[in-house]
Amino acid sequence: MAGRGDLLFAAAELIEREGGRVVRRSYMAADILAGGPSEAAGLPSLLDNLRRPRAPIAGLALDRPRMMGIVNVTPDSFADGGRYLASDAAIAHAQQLEAEGADILDIGGESTRPGADPVDAEEEWRRVGPVIEALAPRTRARLSIDTRKAEVMRRAAQAGVHLINDVSALRHDPASLETAARTGLPVVLMHAQGDPRSMQDKPHYDDVVLDICDWLGARIEACEAAGIPRSRLIVDPGIGFGKTLAHNLALLGSLSLFHGLGCAVLIGASRKSFIGRLTGTADADDRLPGSLAAALIGAAQGVQVLRVHDVAATRQALAVWEGAWRAQASP
Ligand code: 7PJ
């Protein structure tokens, strides 16, 4: 799957909407490869999406899970509590995450946690600009700009970032599609229902996994129409963004479905409140065990990028998973 010899499927479930109903049918892989069930018209392109090797992202081969370390430069981000507001501290934190093994550093200056207030582009750039400018010439890790604003994307690209991460999937700012296309950079398209201020009010889906998969498919098409090829897109179901606990768990359980979109897949579950709600862990800093479990669930379903706070701990968890996984794939 996704060009990886260590990820295989022996059976597949074909899920289709028929009117208001969702119909699920299971097939053995051998039967699909022998020509496929005649009732499944879209199957050849779906199989092609599932199997096609993923292009490297910003020069990173996607043949194993990659870690994106989180660098918040915000006064109100819930997990770090503004501890890294000063750019010197953010730069030091980024370098620490790189030393721990982060492949990508995701630098954000606007908190998008539930209930957060927006900031303008000038203030956002004042926060992230000095951090990007300091890191760009001296880091091995790829730099990602976590922003919803075209102006911040443009300036970050100029300053040398390798990747755009937009939690609004290039919808928040009407100039983002065109600006992102012009940078030529890869883009993470994350699903969110509602905006950060209101998204946890009453999230609703007909079928959370299928609805988000279809939504991301439509965003991919919008990007392609704007000149960003699918090979430069990464999809993300947006854990915690307009989702109940049940929605988040359903998504984590069905991550492999998103490979059918033909892009690399990213998840960000690190320290999120669904872990707290599930386990009664009020303090985000105490959610490392649940975060590691979520990272391994992602790895086991072929997720190519894991967005995490705790790079060293995630690296250790992944090393054990990967060692055993590869040993059974080729004993
Ligand atoms: C995500 C993100 C996520 C992507 C945040 C937090 C909230 N970007 N930015 N995916 N979450 N792509 O880190 O808890 O899940 S901010």
Image (tube, rainbow, N blue to C red):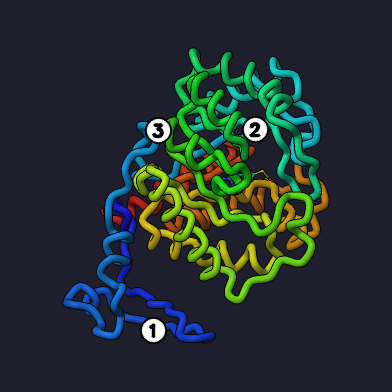
Q: Is residue 10 above or below residue 296?
A: below
Residue 243 percent location from the top left of the image: 68, 62
**Secondary structure found at label 2:** strand
**Apparent side of residue 12 relative to residue 290 in the rendered image (left or right):** left
Using the numbered discs, state the Cα–Cα distance from disc 3 to disc 2 in whole angstroms.
20 Å
**Nearer-the-camera pick, 231 or 107:** 231
Q: Name the residue under label 3.
A: 184
**Secondary structure found at label 1:** strand
Q: Mark 1 points at which residue?
A: 25
- Tell me the amino acid under the disc marked 3: Gly
Residue density around tag 1, few if under 14, some if 14–19, many if 20 or more, within 10 Å = few
Q: Name the residue under label 2.
A: 108
Task: State which image quarter holds ligand 1.
Answer: top right
- Tell me the amino acid under the disc marked 1: Arg
Q: Is residue 111 above or below residue 208?
A: above
Residue density around tag 2, few if under 14, some if 14–19, many if 20 or more, within 10 Å = many
**Nearer-the-camera pick, 30 or 218:** 218
